[in-house]
Amino acid sequence: MAGNNYLTYSASQLAMDESFQQWVLHPDLKNVFWENWVAQYPEKTELVDQARSLVLGIRFRNYALAADEKEELWERIWSGMADEPTQEQQTATPTRKWMPLARYAAAVLAGIILMAGWHYYNTGKQRPVVVSAHTRPGETKQLQLPDSSVVILNANSKLLYTVNNKAEREVWLDGEAFFNVKHTSANQPFTVHTYDNLDVKVLGTRFNVNSLGKEIVVVLETGRIMLNIDNKAAALYLKPGEMIRYNKGDGSFAKTNVDPSQYTAWKSGKLVMEDFSLTDAAVFMKQVFGKTLIISDSQLLNYKVSGSMPIIYDPDTMMTQLSKVFRTRFNQRGDEIWIHKK
Amino acid sequence: MNTGKAARTGLHVVAAHSSLWGLFRQGDRNAFEAIYEKYIDDLYHYGMHCCADHNRVKDCLQDLFQDLWVTREHLTEEIRNIRYYLISCLRRRLLKNSRIDQRYQHPESWDAFEFDFSLPQEHLLIQNETKAEQQRLLQQALNQLTRRQREAIYLRFYQNLSYQEVANIMAMQVDSVYNTISKAISILKKNLPLPLLLILLKS
């Protein structure tokens, strides 16, 4: 359904489209895409009406449960369950007979497992992963880590969290995340490892790390962070409002002053665009929805915009908005979106 | 792309549905009751279309909700669509139940997943005679669909399950769900003359 070229659709085809059906059958849920579409193509009104009546033409005989029956059924559900504990007690008595033996066995077994585990823990370098999380395209997640630091994971990203034997906090990030790290009373460091030669070491701060593209971009909002690049002892420090771009290819990096809110706005559902080109839009669509933008005319790349728009976690709607901003047309084949001049 | 409305309500993926489910799994009775209140009407509606036996549907629903509560801790943590989950549970129960009692499999007096063509009151006066004839033709045409086809159409249009979910529940390919619904639409298109289309539209 996504980005299909609805302009070529017949009434029956429209009536078959899942998102169109959704719009017609559930008028209570706002559907920006179809409302815009209808407004944009007034010549399609008759066709849309026809398709709508086909969808609404499918109706089923009604059966309703009376209010008192509903209540009575709920009573029956609860009263049926009131017997449940007594049944459990009855079945529990006979099992008691072999319980002491079973307990013995369980205790011995637990001991063996514990010792084996301790042995494994000490010999193997493997550390237990405490938390792991990932996001799908078009999805973000807020996580609270066991040390009560908060991480907001952007779309298409993965995060592993563990505590090493020196009680230091460590995470591995693939993708983009905003960190609000809690300063512990024991001053335990918190390290963000990327799957490249760049680590971010902090005590308690707010910062954003994006390792999705060809560069790793770290932006600091508050506090102070230390960067370890290429495992060199010479560490680099960032002050609030500073950003570092690290090139994964040649290992070069540059520090600049930026407005951090521009880089962390995604976590509040806003896309902040400053000198934003179609290339930036392509990076966004790839990261958030896994869609590849193919731009047919290189002239389109020169056009830049500034402003902000809400991020809608639906690729069709987002694409419609973006193409309005850039005054382009688009059509979609699978995960590829082709951009043309209007 | 129908990952459920929940995923798009905002930045956080923890939607009202899943947290309701989470609370229920932790043993929150209010959450359990909220789930009952929210889905009981549609579940009953589905059950009646399935077997048209009021008492049997109520018995199955009672068992379904009791088992749901008893096994809550063992149920999956991540649930995309509670409605989908409950309907598939109810469907299995009703099928199992009707195998025990064969009498209900082919009742002559009743048609499973019967379509409805009643128009709202205010339109009844308009072209009453032609309308009756049109409805008879349409009914005839749609009754050529099999019970399974009607059920698939019902699950998509009445219960708002996605094509994929309908396919899963009925162990069909998504393509065949699509074809089935396409068949229904083309029957409607052939048999609904324009005036009736407009009446439906304005109602």
Image (spheres, coloured by chain):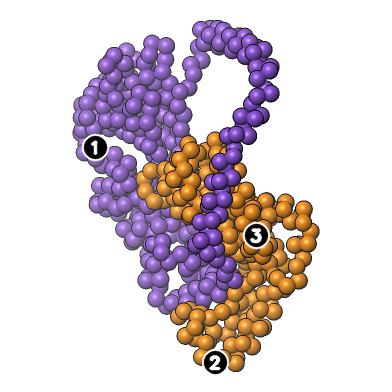
Chain colours: A purple, B orange
Whether residue A75 is situated above or below residue A222 in the rendered picture:
below
Residue A207 percent coordinates (x, y): 28, 31
- Classify 10 Å Cα crowding around label 2: few (below 14), some (14-19), many (20 and above): few
Which residue appears at 22% of the width and 30% of the height? A222
Residue A95 percent coordinates (x, y): 67, 22
Q: Are the residues at dot 2 and dot 3 in contact (C-beta closer than 8 Å)?
A: no
Whether residue A25 is situated above or below residue A200 in the rendered picture:
below
Chain designation of label 2: B
Which residue appears at 77% of the width and 65% of the height? B106
Q: Is residue B162 left or right of residue A250?
A: right
Mark in the foreground, 3 or 1: 3
Element at badge 3? Answer: helix
Q: Is residue A266 left or right of residue A223?
A: right
Element at badge 2? Answer: loop
Residue B7 percent coordinates (x, y): 44, 48
Element at badge 1? Answer: helix
Mark in the foreground, 2 or 3: 3
Query: Gap in Å between the C-alphas at discs 2 and 1?
Result: 67 Å
Chain designation of label 1: A
* Residue topped by disc 3: B55
Q: Amino acid at mark 2?
A: Gln
Can you see residue A324?
yes
Which residue appears at 44% of the width and 43% of the height? B19
Chain designation of label 3: B
Residue B74, numbered circle: none
Name the quadrant of the C terminus of chain A: bottom left
- Classify 10 Å Cα crowding around label 3: few (below 14), some (14-19), many (20 and above): few
* Residue topped by disc 1: A260
Q: Is residue A80 left or right of residue B112?
A: left
* Residue topped by disc 2: B127
